[in-house]
Amino acid sequence: MPVDAPRWKVSLHGGHSREYCDHASSTLREMLEAAVEAGYHTFGVTEHAPRVEARFLYPNEIAMGWDVPKLLADFERYAQTLPTLAEEFADRLIVLRGFEIEVVPADSYVSLMQDYRRRYAFEYIVGSVHYVREISIDGSAEDFQTAIDTCGGIEPLAVSYYQTVAEMVTALRPEVVAHLDLIKLHGRHFGLQETDTVRRAAEEALEAVRATRGIVEVNTAGYRKGLGEPYPAPWLVQLAQRMGVGFCLGDDSHRVEQVGFGIEQAREYLLQQGVRALTVLTREGNNLCRQEVPLE
Ligand SMILES: [Zn+2]
Ligand SMILES: [Zn+2]
């Protein structure tokens, strides 16, 4: 069993590594060493699912000469390497095996993601929406502007974003729902406001999370991206709490310096909102289990 770490110290989203991800910069082994160092009880590794069409390659990937077959091969290698490493670290850290989904291509992502999950026997998935109508909303500001133009404004884009979250959650039933208000990353520079219409759409997304027993991730990347708060914002934490939806933490780490970053702050953040317990995934024996653990 791992050393005595507080039971709330669990990250269910992160551990991206440079062997399998163009925008990560440490190896997976280094990430796990950092997770031990950070004092985690349980660390969920959730590499990005591959994007299966060339039009979704990132500019950086294209510049490096990467293509779809490489992404697919990297993901397979990830899925095959992770169990061995998890086993190797088992006496120091509980390592969970997951991946972070994509909602592209829009017409086939559901079966693609279900297939990855089954084929590689992942223990859980992280549900994320990085695209609206197949346009990236957390990449460049230019892409974000295109998404606004395509939807007819920032408010319709935000509504469309939350509708995509709701559909994804209902279709894939992810255990963890990541960075629920990711739309604010660029949206705050494009006049995004929490109008009644936006709030209603967000509430419907949360209703889908509640109905599928999903856990809302409090994602500390918001701190390092200069948002002054994690994802999701206080109004969404309040809403989720009123609806009886549980919370977990995620550091969304892509390099060793980000492992554990902002986790104590996120704990304080939740306590300030009156959240007294987390809903975590961990492993006991050979079984993945879901537990309520006190934050204090
Ligand atoms: Zn990433
Ligand atoms: Zn993400």
Image: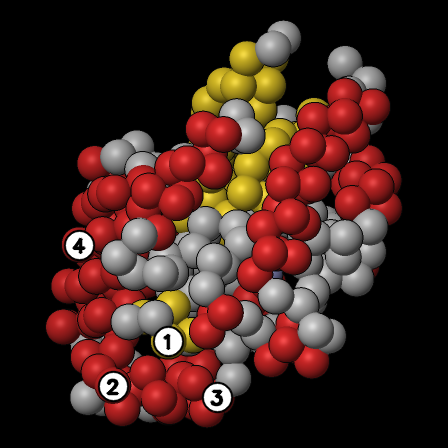
In the rendered view, would you say 24 is above or below 33? below
Answer whether labels 2 and 3 touch (C-beta < 8 Å). Answer: no
Which type of secondary structure does the marked residue at label 2 adopt? helix
Mark 1, secondary structure of its residue:
strand
Give the mark nearest the N terminus, 1 or 3.
Answer: 1
Mark 1 and mark 4 lie on one chain; the one further toward the N terminus is: 1
How far across and how far down the image is residue 203, in percent? 20, 56
Could you say which is closer to the camera, residue 268 or residue 161?
161
Measuring 60% from the left and 56% from the top, which residue is drawn there? 69
| Residues at marks 1 and 4, CA–CA distance in whole angstroms | 22 Å
Amino acid type at mark 1: Ile
Outermost residue toward the front in this view? 69
Q: Earlier in the sequence, mark 2 or mark 1?
A: 1
- In this rendering, position of residue 88 left or right of residue 183: right
**Mark 1 sits on what residue?**
135
Q: Could you tell me which residue is drawn at 82 percent across and 56 percent down?
A: 26
Q: Are marks 2 and 1 in contact (CB under 8 Å)?
A: yes
- Is residue 212 visible to us here? yes
On residue 204, the disc is 4
Q: Which of marks 2 and 4 is nearer the N terminus?
A: 2
Give, as a three-letter code, the residue at label 3.
Ala
Query: Which residue is depicted at the point 51% across and 77% down?
Result: 139
Q: As shown in the figure, which amino acid type bears the numbered disc 2?
A: Thr
Q: Mark 2 points at which residue?
A: 150
SS class, disc 4? helix
Disc 2 to disc 1, C-alpha distance = 9 Å
Q: Earlier in the sequence, mark 2 or mark 3?
A: 3
Q: Nearer the viewer, mark 1 or mark 3?
A: 1
